[in-house]
Image: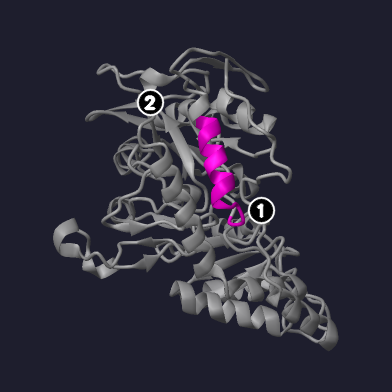
Amino acid sequence: MKKEFIPFENRIWLSSPTMHGQELVFVKEAYDTNWMSTMGTNINEIEKKICEYVGCKYAVALGTGTSALHMAVKLAGVKPGEKVFCSDLTFAATVNPVKYEGGEPVFIDSEYETWNMDPVALEQAFELYPDVRVVVMAHLYGTPAKMDELTSVCQKHGAVIIEDAAESLGATYKTQSGPKESGCSAATLGQETGTFGKYNAISFNGNKIITGSSGGMFLTDDREAADRVRKWSTQSRENAPWYQHEEIGYNYRMSNVVAGIIRGQLLYLDEHIARKKEVYERYREGFQDLPVSMNPYDEKCSEPNFWLSCLLIDEEAMCRQIRDEHEALYISEAGKSCPTEILEMLARYNAEGRPIWKPMHMQPIYRMNGFVTREGDGRAVINTGKSGTVMGHDGKPLDVGNDIFNRGLCLPSDVKMTEEQQDTVIEMVRSCFE
Protein backbone atom coordinates (compact mmCIF):
# COMPACT_ATOMS: atom_id res chain seq x y z
CA MET A 1 0.00 0.00 0.00
CA LYS A 2 1.49 3.28 -1.11
CA LYS A 3 1.79 6.12 1.39
CA GLU A 4 -0.94 8.76 1.31
CA PHE A 5 -0.28 12.53 1.23
CA ILE A 6 -2.32 15.67 1.63
CA PRO A 7 -2.80 17.29 -1.81
CA PHE A 8 -1.03 20.61 -2.29
CA GLU A 9 -3.50 23.45 -1.82
CA ASN A 10 -1.87 25.41 -4.64
CA ARG A 11 -0.55 23.50 -7.61
CA ILE A 12 3.20 22.85 -7.68
CA TRP A 13 4.24 23.61 -11.23
CA LEU A 14 6.94 22.12 -13.41
CA SER A 15 8.31 25.57 -14.25
CA SER A 16 5.95 28.53 -14.20
CA PRO A 17 6.71 32.24 -14.77
CA THR A 18 8.22 34.01 -11.75
CA MET A 19 7.41 37.71 -11.91
CA HIS A 20 8.94 40.45 -9.78
CA GLY A 21 7.11 43.72 -10.54
CA GLN A 22 9.90 45.49 -12.39
CA GLU A 23 8.44 44.06 -15.59
CA LEU A 24 5.41 46.36 -15.22
CA VAL A 25 7.63 49.44 -15.17
CA PHE A 26 8.95 48.70 -18.65
CA VAL A 27 5.57 47.56 -19.98
CA LYS A 28 4.09 50.85 -18.74
CA GLU A 29 6.92 52.70 -20.44
CA ALA A 30 5.87 51.11 -23.75
CA TYR A 31 2.26 52.09 -23.03
CA ASP A 32 3.05 55.65 -21.94
CA THR A 33 5.30 56.32 -24.94
CA ASN A 34 2.83 54.60 -27.28
CA TRP A 35 5.48 52.22 -28.65
CA MET A 36 3.20 49.17 -28.67
CA SER A 37 4.30 47.45 -31.88
CA THR A 38 7.58 45.97 -33.07
CA MET A 39 9.82 48.98 -32.42
CA GLY A 40 10.84 50.76 -29.22
CA THR A 41 13.30 51.18 -26.38
CA ASN A 42 12.50 47.85 -24.73
CA ILE A 43 13.46 45.92 -27.88
CA ASN A 44 16.64 47.90 -28.30
CA GLU A 45 17.59 47.38 -24.65
CA ILE A 46 17.05 43.62 -24.48
CA GLU A 47 18.99 43.08 -27.71
CA LYS A 48 21.85 45.07 -26.21
CA LYS A 49 21.66 43.43 -22.76
CA ILE A 50 21.47 39.86 -24.11
CA CYS A 51 24.54 40.50 -26.27
CA GLU A 52 26.40 41.77 -23.21
CA TYR A 53 25.29 38.84 -21.04
CA VAL A 54 25.81 36.03 -23.54
CA GLY A 55 28.83 37.44 -25.32
CA CYS A 56 27.62 37.65 -28.91
CA LYS A 57 27.90 40.64 -31.23
CA TYR A 58 24.35 40.82 -32.58
CA ALA A 59 20.88 39.87 -31.38
CA VAL A 60 17.50 40.18 -33.09
CA ALA A 61 14.37 40.02 -30.92
CA LEU A 62 11.70 37.80 -32.49
CA GLY A 63 8.25 36.51 -31.60
CA THR A 64 9.39 33.01 -30.61
CA GLY A 65 12.46 30.84 -30.26
CA THR A 66 11.08 28.74 -33.12
CA SER A 67 11.07 31.75 -35.45
CA ALA A 68 14.71 32.38 -34.50
CA LEU A 69 15.57 28.79 -35.42
CA HIS A 70 13.66 29.16 -38.69
CA MET A 71 15.69 32.23 -39.57
CA ALA A 72 18.88 30.33 -38.71
CA VAL A 73 17.94 27.42 -41.00
CA LYS A 74 17.04 29.85 -43.79
CA LEU A 75 20.36 31.67 -43.38
CA ALA A 76 22.19 28.34 -43.57
CA GLY A 77 20.66 27.92 -47.01
CA VAL A 78 18.93 24.60 -46.40
CA LYS A 79 17.26 23.50 -49.64
CA PRO A 80 14.27 21.18 -50.25
CA GLY A 81 15.34 17.57 -49.89
CA GLU A 82 18.67 18.44 -48.26
CA LYS A 83 19.62 16.30 -45.27
CA VAL A 84 20.32 18.11 -41.99
CA PHE A 85 21.68 16.46 -38.84
CA CYS A 86 19.50 17.23 -35.79
CA SER A 87 19.39 16.41 -32.09
CA ASP A 88 17.07 13.47 -31.50
CA LEU A 89 16.24 13.88 -27.80
CA THR A 90 14.63 17.32 -27.90
CA PHE A 91 11.36 19.19 -28.41
CA ALA A 92 9.90 19.27 -31.92
CA ALA A 93 10.59 23.01 -32.22
CA THR A 94 14.31 22.22 -32.62
CA VAL A 95 13.60 20.19 -35.74
CA ASN A 96 10.46 21.58 -37.38
CA PRO A 97 12.18 24.68 -38.86
CA VAL A 98 14.27 22.33 -41.02
CA LYS A 99 11.01 21.11 -42.54
CA TYR A 100 9.79 24.70 -43.01
CA GLU A 101 12.58 25.10 -45.55
CA GLY A 102 11.97 21.67 -47.07
CA GLY A 103 14.98 19.99 -45.48
CA GLU A 104 15.11 16.36 -44.35
CA PRO A 105 16.13 15.88 -40.69
CA VAL A 106 18.45 12.98 -39.89
CA PHE A 107 18.46 12.39 -36.15
CA ILE A 108 21.62 11.88 -34.10
CA ASP A 109 21.36 9.83 -30.91
CA SER A 110 22.26 11.16 -27.44
CA GLU A 111 25.02 10.17 -25.02
CA TYR A 112 24.52 9.41 -21.31
CA GLU A 113 26.96 12.01 -19.90
CA THR A 114 24.83 15.06 -20.81
CA TRP A 115 21.82 13.55 -22.64
CA ASN A 116 22.74 15.69 -25.65
CA MET A 117 23.91 14.92 -29.20
CA ASP A 118 26.58 12.20 -29.21
CA PRO A 119 29.78 13.39 -30.97
CA VAL A 120 30.72 9.79 -31.85
CA ALA A 121 27.35 9.19 -33.48
CA LEU A 122 27.69 12.53 -35.30
CA GLU A 123 31.08 11.53 -36.72
CA GLN A 124 29.63 8.22 -37.87
CA ALA A 125 26.67 10.07 -39.41
CA PHE A 126 29.07 12.06 -41.60
CA GLU A 127 30.54 8.76 -42.81
CA LEU A 128 27.05 7.73 -43.89
CA TYR A 129 25.97 11.13 -45.22
CA PRO A 130 29.19 12.98 -46.20
CA ASP A 131 27.36 15.78 -48.06
CA VAL A 132 25.52 17.13 -44.99
CA ARG A 133 26.59 20.71 -44.26
CA VAL A 134 24.23 21.84 -41.45
CA VAL A 135 23.92 20.51 -37.88
CA VAL A 136 21.11 21.65 -35.56
CA MET A 137 21.84 20.76 -31.94
CA ALA A 138 20.12 21.52 -28.62
CA HIS A 139 21.20 21.82 -24.98
CA LEU A 140 18.65 19.60 -23.25
CA TYR A 141 16.96 20.96 -20.10
CA GLY A 142 19.62 23.67 -19.75
CA THR A 143 22.66 21.34 -19.78
CA PRO A 144 25.46 22.20 -22.23
CA ALA A 145 26.32 19.59 -24.84
CA LYS A 146 29.88 18.40 -25.48
CA MET A 147 30.66 21.43 -27.60
CA ASP A 148 34.42 20.88 -28.01
CA GLU A 149 33.84 17.47 -29.56
CA LEU A 150 30.78 18.48 -31.59
CA THR A 151 32.49 21.61 -32.92
CA SER A 152 35.57 19.61 -33.86
CA VAL A 153 33.50 17.11 -35.85
CA CYS A 154 31.60 19.87 -37.65
CA GLN A 155 34.76 21.79 -38.50
CA LYS A 156 36.36 18.62 -39.84
CA HIS A 157 33.43 18.13 -42.23
CA GLY A 158 32.85 21.80 -43.06
CA ALA A 159 29.39 21.89 -41.47
CA VAL A 160 27.62 24.91 -39.98
CA ILE A 161 26.32 24.59 -36.41
CA ILE A 162 22.90 25.99 -35.52
CA GLU A 163 22.62 26.08 -31.75
CA ASP A 164 19.22 25.70 -30.09
CA ALA A 165 19.87 27.30 -26.70
CA ALA A 166 16.15 27.82 -26.02
CA GLU A 167 16.37 25.91 -22.73
CA SER A 168 19.89 26.92 -21.70
CA LEU A 169 20.09 30.73 -21.41
CA GLY A 170 22.73 31.45 -18.76
CA ALA A 171 24.39 28.03 -18.97
CA THR A 172 28.14 27.95 -19.59
CA TYR A 173 30.41 25.37 -21.16
CA LYS A 174 33.69 25.28 -19.27
CA THR A 175 33.68 26.77 -15.79
CA GLN A 176 36.11 28.69 -13.63
CA SER A 177 37.21 25.44 -11.97
CA GLY A 178 39.94 25.74 -14.57
CA PRO A 179 41.58 23.64 -17.24
CA LYS A 180 44.41 22.03 -15.26
CA GLU A 181 42.52 19.42 -13.26
CA SER A 182 39.66 19.02 -15.70
CA GLY A 183 41.30 18.98 -19.09
CA CYS A 184 39.01 21.82 -20.16
CA SER A 185 40.13 24.07 -22.96
CA ALA A 186 41.05 27.53 -21.66
CA ALA A 187 40.01 28.98 -25.01
CA THR A 188 36.35 28.41 -24.18
CA LEU A 189 36.52 28.81 -20.41
CA GLY A 190 33.11 30.01 -19.21
CA GLN A 191 31.60 30.47 -22.68
CA GLU A 192 27.83 30.89 -22.72
CA THR A 193 25.62 28.57 -24.72
CA GLY A 194 24.11 30.38 -27.67
CA THR A 195 27.55 31.49 -28.90
CA PHE A 196 29.05 28.27 -30.30
CA GLY A 197 27.06 28.07 -33.51
CA LYS A 198 27.20 30.39 -36.48
CA TYR A 199 23.49 31.06 -35.96
CA ASN A 200 21.83 30.54 -32.58
CA ALA A 201 18.45 30.84 -30.85
CA ILE A 202 17.13 31.40 -27.32
CA SER A 203 13.57 31.40 -26.02
CA PHE A 204 11.51 33.48 -23.59
CA ASN A 205 8.48 31.15 -23.58
CA GLY A 206 6.31 31.14 -20.46
CA ASN A 207 8.11 28.24 -18.74
CA LYS A 208 11.72 29.21 -19.53
CA ILE A 209 14.35 30.45 -17.06
CA ILE A 210 13.10 34.01 -17.74
CA THR A 211 10.02 34.84 -19.76
CA GLY A 212 8.23 37.48 -21.77
CA SER A 213 5.12 35.28 -21.89
CA SER A 214 6.46 34.54 -25.37
CA GLY A 215 9.39 35.69 -27.44
CA GLY A 216 12.74 34.50 -28.72
CA MET A 217 15.99 35.89 -30.02
CA PHE A 218 18.38 35.19 -32.88
CA LEU A 219 22.06 35.44 -31.88
CA THR A 220 25.13 35.68 -34.11
CA ASP A 221 28.52 37.33 -34.58
CA ASP A 222 27.70 37.91 -38.25
CA ARG A 223 26.39 41.45 -38.83
CA GLU A 224 25.12 40.68 -42.33
CA ALA A 225 23.17 37.68 -41.00
CA ALA A 226 21.58 39.81 -38.26
CA ASP A 227 20.60 42.48 -40.79
CA ARG A 228 18.99 39.87 -43.03
CA VAL A 229 16.99 38.46 -40.12
CA ARG A 230 15.77 41.97 -39.22
CA LYS A 231 14.58 42.39 -42.79
CA TRP A 232 13.05 38.93 -43.19
CA SER A 233 11.26 39.17 -39.84
CA THR A 234 9.48 42.40 -40.86
CA GLN A 235 7.99 41.01 -44.09
CA SER A 236 11.17 41.71 -46.08
CA ARG A 237 10.26 45.31 -46.71
CA GLU A 238 12.83 47.06 -48.89
CA ASN A 239 14.29 50.49 -48.18
CA ALA A 240 11.89 52.36 -50.46
CA PRO A 241 9.28 55.13 -49.96
CA TRP A 242 6.51 52.60 -50.63
CA TYR A 243 5.98 48.96 -49.63
CA GLN A 244 8.49 47.22 -51.85
CA HIS A 245 9.04 43.46 -51.50
CA GLU A 246 11.67 41.53 -53.45
CA GLU A 247 11.79 38.32 -51.39
CA ILE A 248 9.50 36.38 -49.07
CA GLY A 249 9.26 37.79 -45.55
CA TYR A 250 7.74 36.84 -42.21
CA ASN A 251 5.84 38.56 -39.41
CA TYR A 252 8.35 37.42 -36.78
CA ARG A 253 9.46 40.59 -34.96
CA MET A 254 8.94 40.86 -31.19
CA SER A 255 6.46 43.30 -29.67
CA ASN A 256 7.89 46.17 -27.61
CA VAL A 257 5.39 45.22 -24.88
CA VAL A 258 6.71 41.64 -24.67
CA ALA A 259 10.23 43.07 -24.72
CA GLY A 260 9.32 45.16 -21.67
CA ILE A 261 8.51 42.01 -19.70
CA ILE A 262 11.80 40.42 -20.76
CA ARG A 263 13.70 43.60 -19.89
CA GLY A 264 12.37 43.35 -16.35
CA GLN A 265 13.03 39.61 -16.15
CA LEU A 266 16.65 39.97 -17.25
CA LEU A 267 17.41 41.71 -13.96
CA TYR A 268 16.62 38.42 -12.18
CA LEU A 269 18.20 35.88 -14.55
CA ASP A 270 21.13 35.03 -12.26
CA GLU A 271 18.78 34.80 -9.28
CA HIS A 272 16.55 32.34 -11.14
CA ILE A 273 19.54 30.21 -12.12
CA ALA A 274 20.80 30.11 -8.53
CA ARG A 275 17.38 29.07 -7.26
CA LYS A 276 17.04 26.37 -9.95
CA LYS A 277 20.41 24.98 -8.90
CA GLU A 278 19.23 24.84 -5.26
CA VAL A 279 16.20 22.82 -6.39
CA TYR A 280 18.43 20.42 -8.36
CA GLU A 281 20.86 19.92 -5.46
CA ARG A 282 18.04 19.38 -2.97
CA TYR A 283 16.61 16.63 -5.18
CA ARG A 284 20.02 15.03 -5.59
CA GLU A 285 20.51 14.98 -1.82
CA GLY A 286 17.01 13.68 -1.21
CA PHE A 287 17.35 10.77 -3.64
CA GLN A 288 20.93 9.71 -2.89
CA ASP A 289 19.95 6.31 -1.45
CA LEU A 290 17.36 5.52 -4.13
CA PRO A 291 18.13 3.55 -7.34
CA VAL A 292 17.95 6.74 -9.41
CA SER A 293 20.20 9.51 -10.74
CA MET A 294 19.66 13.14 -11.72
CA ASN A 295 20.09 14.51 -15.24
CA PRO A 296 23.89 14.61 -15.55
CA TYR A 297 26.39 17.27 -16.52
CA ASP A 298 30.17 17.58 -16.57
CA GLU A 299 30.76 19.26 -13.20
CA LYS A 300 34.36 20.16 -14.07
CA CYS A 301 33.72 21.64 -17.49
CA SER A 302 30.21 23.07 -17.55
CA GLU A 303 27.58 24.83 -15.47
CA PRO A 304 23.95 24.30 -16.55
CA ASN A 305 21.19 26.80 -15.83
CA PHE A 306 19.35 23.86 -14.15
CA TRP A 307 16.11 24.81 -15.93
CA LEU A 308 14.51 21.43 -15.21
CA SER A 309 15.53 18.82 -12.65
CA CYS A 310 15.10 15.34 -14.10
CA LEU A 311 15.25 11.82 -12.72
CA LEU A 312 16.53 8.63 -14.36
CA ILE A 313 15.54 5.34 -12.76
CA ASP A 314 18.18 2.58 -12.67
CA GLU A 315 17.42 -0.18 -15.14
CA GLU A 316 17.13 -2.88 -12.47
CA ALA A 317 14.73 -0.70 -10.44
CA MET A 318 12.20 -0.26 -13.26
CA CYS A 319 8.81 -1.84 -12.79
CA ARG A 320 7.05 -3.09 -15.92
CA GLN A 321 5.80 -0.20 -18.05
CA ILE A 322 4.23 -0.13 -21.50
CA ARG A 323 3.55 2.98 -23.58
CA ASP A 324 1.64 3.27 -26.84
CA GLU A 325 1.10 6.46 -28.82
CA HIS A 326 -1.30 8.02 -26.30
CA GLU A 327 -1.41 5.99 -23.09
CA ALA A 328 0.86 4.26 -20.59
CA LEU A 329 0.35 1.27 -18.30
CA TYR A 330 2.51 -0.12 -15.51
CA ILE A 331 2.48 -2.88 -12.91
CA SER A 332 3.46 -1.73 -9.43
CA GLU A 333 6.28 -3.73 -7.84
CA ALA A 334 7.80 -3.51 -4.36
CA GLY A 335 11.15 -1.72 -4.41
CA LYS A 336 10.67 -0.62 -8.01
CA SER A 337 8.93 2.16 -9.89
CA CYS A 338 8.70 3.78 -13.33
CA PRO A 339 8.09 7.27 -14.76
CA THR A 340 4.38 6.61 -15.26
CA GLU A 341 3.85 5.65 -11.62
CA ILE A 342 5.76 8.66 -10.30
CA LEU A 343 4.01 11.09 -12.63
CA GLU A 344 0.62 9.72 -11.61
CA MET A 345 1.60 10.06 -7.95
CA LEU A 346 2.57 13.71 -8.43
CA ALA A 347 -0.59 14.52 -10.39
CA ARG A 348 -2.78 12.87 -7.73
CA TYR A 349 -1.52 15.36 -5.16
CA ASN A 350 -1.61 18.46 -7.38
CA ALA A 351 2.03 18.60 -8.51
CA GLU A 352 3.17 18.75 -12.12
CA GLY A 353 5.85 16.54 -13.62
CA ARG A 354 6.21 15.39 -17.20
CA PRO A 355 7.90 12.69 -19.28
CA ILE A 356 11.28 13.27 -20.88
CA TRP A 357 10.96 14.54 -24.45
CA LYS A 358 9.96 11.67 -26.70
CA PRO A 359 12.82 11.26 -29.20
CA MET A 360 12.16 12.71 -32.62
CA HIS A 361 12.85 9.47 -34.48
CA MET A 362 9.97 7.90 -32.52
CA GLN A 363 7.49 10.63 -33.44
CA PRO A 364 4.90 9.57 -36.05
CA ILE A 365 5.79 12.47 -38.38
CA TYR A 366 9.51 11.60 -38.36
CA ARG A 367 9.58 7.81 -38.08
CA MET A 368 10.80 7.27 -41.60
CA ASN A 369 13.68 9.75 -41.25
CA GLY A 370 17.22 8.55 -40.73
CA PHE A 371 18.45 7.96 -37.18
CA VAL A 372 22.12 7.39 -36.40
CA THR A 373 23.35 5.87 -33.15
CA ARG A 374 26.50 4.02 -32.14
CA GLU A 375 27.52 0.66 -30.72
CA GLY A 376 31.08 0.66 -29.50
CA ASP A 377 33.27 1.47 -32.48
CA GLY A 378 30.63 0.31 -34.94
CA ARG A 379 27.51 2.02 -36.09
CA ALA A 380 23.84 1.40 -36.70
CA VAL A 381 21.12 3.24 -38.57
CA ILE A 382 17.55 2.84 -37.40
CA ASN A 383 14.69 4.15 -39.54
CA THR A 384 11.75 3.25 -37.36
CA GLY A 385 10.38 4.46 -34.04
CA LYS A 386 9.27 1.18 -32.53
CA SER A 387 8.59 1.17 -28.79
CA GLY A 388 11.08 -0.48 -26.46
CA THR A 389 14.84 -0.14 -26.20
CA VAL A 390 17.10 -1.33 -29.03
CA MET A 391 19.96 -3.37 -27.55
CA GLY A 392 23.50 -3.68 -28.87
CA HIS A 393 25.66 -6.79 -28.96
CA ASP A 394 27.21 -5.84 -25.61
CA GLY A 395 23.79 -5.86 -23.95
CA LYS A 396 23.71 -2.09 -23.49
CA PRO A 397 21.02 0.14 -24.98
CA LEU A 398 21.77 1.07 -28.56
CA ASP A 399 19.10 3.76 -28.71
CA VAL A 400 20.19 6.04 -25.86
CA GLY A 401 17.46 8.66 -26.31
CA ASN A 402 14.74 6.04 -26.20
CA ASP A 403 16.27 4.52 -23.07
CA ILE A 404 16.31 7.91 -21.32
CA PHE A 405 12.71 8.53 -22.44
CA ASN A 406 11.64 5.15 -21.05
CA ARG A 407 13.34 5.53 -17.67
CA GLY A 408 13.30 9.30 -17.12
CA LEU A 409 10.95 12.07 -16.03
CA CYS A 410 11.01 15.81 -15.30
CA LEU A 411 10.32 16.81 -11.68
CA PRO A 412 8.61 19.96 -10.40
CA SER A 413 11.34 22.59 -10.78
CA ASP A 414 9.54 25.84 -10.11
CA VAL A 415 11.53 28.76 -8.72
CA LYS A 416 8.70 29.55 -6.27
CA MET A 417 8.50 26.02 -4.80
CA THR A 418 9.32 26.14 -1.08
CA GLU A 419 11.73 23.75 0.63
CA GLU A 420 8.80 22.22 2.51
CA GLN A 421 6.92 21.63 -0.73
CA GLN A 422 9.97 20.10 -2.36
CA ASP A 423 10.53 17.85 0.64
CA THR A 424 6.99 16.56 0.15
CA VAL A 425 7.63 15.94 -3.55
CA ILE A 426 10.79 14.01 -2.59
CA GLU A 427 8.79 11.88 -0.16
CA MET A 428 6.19 11.19 -2.85
CA VAL A 429 8.87 9.91 -5.21
CA ARG A 430 10.48 7.83 -2.46
CA SER A 431 7.13 6.25 -1.61
CA CYS A 432 6.86 4.90 -5.16
CA PHE A 433 9.87 2.65 -4.46
CA GLU A 434 8.46 1.18 -1.23
**Does 3 sit above or below residue 131?**
above
To which quarter of the image does residue 236 belong?
Answer: bottom right
Secondary structure under the numbered disc 2 in the rendered image:
loop
User: Circle 2 sits on which residue?
Assistant: 314
Q: Residue lying at the far left in this picture: please name it.
A: 180
State whether residue 28 is above or below residue 189.
Answer: below
Total count of labels: 2
**Image spot of residue 262 (x, y percent):** 65, 71
Q: Is residue 363 visible?
A: no
Q: Is residue 402 magenta?
A: no
Name the residue beneath numbered marker 1.
Answer: 16
Q: Amino acid at mark 2?
A: Asp
Q: Secondary structure at mark 1?
A: loop
The quadrant where residue 127 appears: top left
Q: Earlier in the sequence, mark 2 or mark 1?
A: 1
Residue at the spot 15% in from the left edge and 59% down from the top edge:
181
**In which quarter of the view is residue 66 placed?**
bottom right
| Residue drawn where x is 48% and y is 75% of the image | 53
> 342 left or right of 192?
right
User: Does the magenta portion include 421?
Assistant: yes
Task: Pinpoint residue 202: horizontal percent, then vertical percent.
Answer: 56, 61
Q: What is the C-alpha distance between the residues marked 2 and 1?
A: 29 Å
Q: Position of residue 185 (x, y in %)?
A: 22, 63
Does 368 sit left or right of 113 as displayed? Answer: right
Range of the magenta residues? 415-429
Residue 251 located left or right of residue 77: right
- Of 131 and 39, the residue lying toward us: 39
